[in-house]
Amino acid sequence: MDYAYCLKRITAECEPLAAAVITRDGVVVASETPPGASSETFSIMCATMMGAGLTALAEVGRSPPSRITLDGEVHMAVLEADEKHIVAVVSDRPLDIANLESVTRQVFGPIPAG
């Protein structure tokens, strides 16, 4: 799979400040980060966020999250891409989460149940 192409498809409409396709353990697969930013640090922290959400929900007997969102001065989404990857997007503009999820599903396909 061409992950750089996947990332461009996913971020085509949101003008990201940074975006990445990341393995669940934080390895950069494809990224677009601004000059001076570490794509490795960005990716590791995004994977950590998803892992923390998974652990927190498991502690209260709930299913793992399919996404984590942060909103403030900037907007961020970390989305489940497939069983091995997540996608992270940061933008100055509010993110259309439903569209990001839809395009992610088009690019990566459905997430297998279970």
Image (cartoon, grey):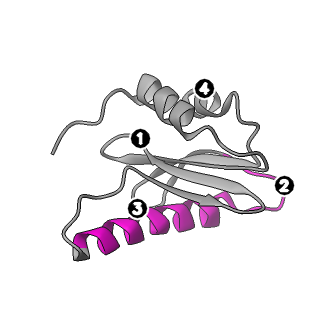
Dominant secondary structure, magenta? helix
Does residue 100 appear anywhere in the picture? yes
Q: Earlier in the sequence, mark 4 or mark 2?
A: 4
Q: State left or right for residue 1 relative to residue 33.
A: left
Q: Nearer the viewer, residue 14 or 62?
A: 62
Q: Residue furthest right?
A: 35
Crowding near the residue tagged with mark 2, few <14, some 14–19, many ≥20 C-alpha atoms within 10 Å: few
Judging by the rendered image, the residue that carries numbered circle 2 is 35
Q: Amino acid at mark 2?
A: Pro
Crowding near the residue tagged with mark 3, few <14, some 14–19, many ≥20 C-alpha atoms within 10 Å: some
Judging by the rendered image, the residue that carries numbered circle 3 is 25
What x and y, as percent, mark residue 110?
A: 31, 29
Give the CA separation, mark 4 to mark 1: 13 Å
Boundaries of the magenta span: 32-58
What x and y, as percent, mark residue 19?
A: 65, 46
Q: Which mark is residue 9?
A: 4
Give the CA separation, mark 3 to mark 4: 23 Å
Classify the position of the N terminus by image quarter.
top left
Give the CA separation, mark 2 to mark 3: 24 Å
Q: Amino acid at mark 1?
A: Ala
